[in-house]
Image (cartoon, grey):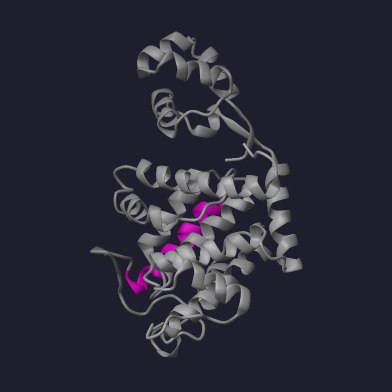
Amino acid sequence: MIILGIKYDGLFQLLRERKISKTELRRRLGLSSATIAKLAKNEPVSLKVIEDICKELACQPGDILHYEPDNSHNNKLLALLLEEKEMKLKGGLYHTSQIKFAYNSNHIEGSRLSEEQTRYIYETNTLAVEEDELISVDDIIETVNHFRCFDYILDHVNDELSEELIKTCHKILKSNTSDSRKDWFRVGEYKMRPNTVGERKTTSPAKVKGEMARLLIEYNEKRIITLDDILDFHYRFESIHPFQDGNGRVGRLIMFKECLKHNIMPFIIGERHKLYYYRGLSEYENEKGFLRDTCLSAQDLYKELVNYFMKENIE
């Protein structure tokens, strides 16, 4: 996360008002000296520590901390992506992000195109195949559509997350596929038939609109959006599974957009993260850390790309 400062002024003000020392707080919660030192130095601590403190003091996170965001790095990252997009620059961060994002997100959902074939489609608008190799037309179309979706979220990165934006992403992603020729599939509209994620039931079609409206209202009402808020939105979105198909890819595009908007290093869930990602979603209700750790690992990989292309460190 790109943050200039996390301030715990509210915490220490609250402790003074209640005449609770840092030593006493440490004793009550079983915190380490290192954690108390981080709080005193305004350094990040785990979400669990914040939750435990709030529970002990009967307060909300906003009562004990606030963020001072630094837009400069994130603005440079977004500006670079948009500049390279406009220039149609080859071999840069935008070019690389397009290929890696489309390949990995589609591959997670079953596409059989290789990363090299994805690159070939992006760079030449053609596809090279081996003799007797069979390629799904839908895999090709959805790859091209994903390129367009990525452009769409960059162009609308600062827009509030809305039903229209999410539906447009789905419409772009699934247009001209074999699914789009099915009347009941409803490209760019919420599902008409029940679906599942693995063996888990999702929100029934009749309740999707209401659940999505509630999710968007609760998310957009937050004063500050953190990585944990974005992951929580993603989990709830995937649990609703509002579209007949394409939910995972739309959801991951949304995460990338929201990270860029809220000064958080974006990330691409790759093939190496696939099983951990699915585990994180399936066990999210009981343990949020699995999904968070997976996304942080993916974030580190994308950060390496950003650092390489921007020739500077982004902390």
Q: Residue at x 67, y 59 (%)?
A: 92
- Picture coordinates of residue 66, whole percent (x, y): 60, 32
Q: Which stretch appears magenta?
A: 204-221
- Picture coordinates of residue 14, whole percent (x, y): 53, 19
Question: In the image as oriented, which residue stretches furthest toward the left?
Answer: 199
- Picture coordinates of residue 306, whole percent (x, y): 63, 48
State left or right for residue 199 relative to residue 268. left
Q: Main secondary structure of the magenta part?
A: helix
Whether residue 28 is visible to the viewer of this picture, yes or no, is yes
Quadrant of res 13: top right
Q: Which residue is drawn at 52% across and 47% down?
A: 301
Of residues 170 and 164, the one nearer the viewer is 170
**Quadrant (top left, top right, bottom left, bottom right) of the N terminus:** top right
State left or right for residue 168 relative to residue 281. right
State whether residue 128 is above or below residue 288. Answer: below
Residue 217 on the magenta span: yes
Residue 5 on the magenta span: no
State whether residue 36 is above or below residue 155. Answer: above
Of residues 56 and 225, the one nearer the viewer is 225
Of residues 190 and 3, the one nearer the viewer is 3
Question: In the image as oriented, which residue stretches furthest toward the front?
Answer: 131
Q: Residue at x 30, y 72 (%)?
A: 195
State left or right for residue 3 relative to residue 291. right
State whether residue 298 is above or below residue 142. Answer: above
Q: Residue at x 44, y 90 (%)?
A: 181
**Quadrant (top left, top right, bottom left, bottom right) of the C terminus:** top right
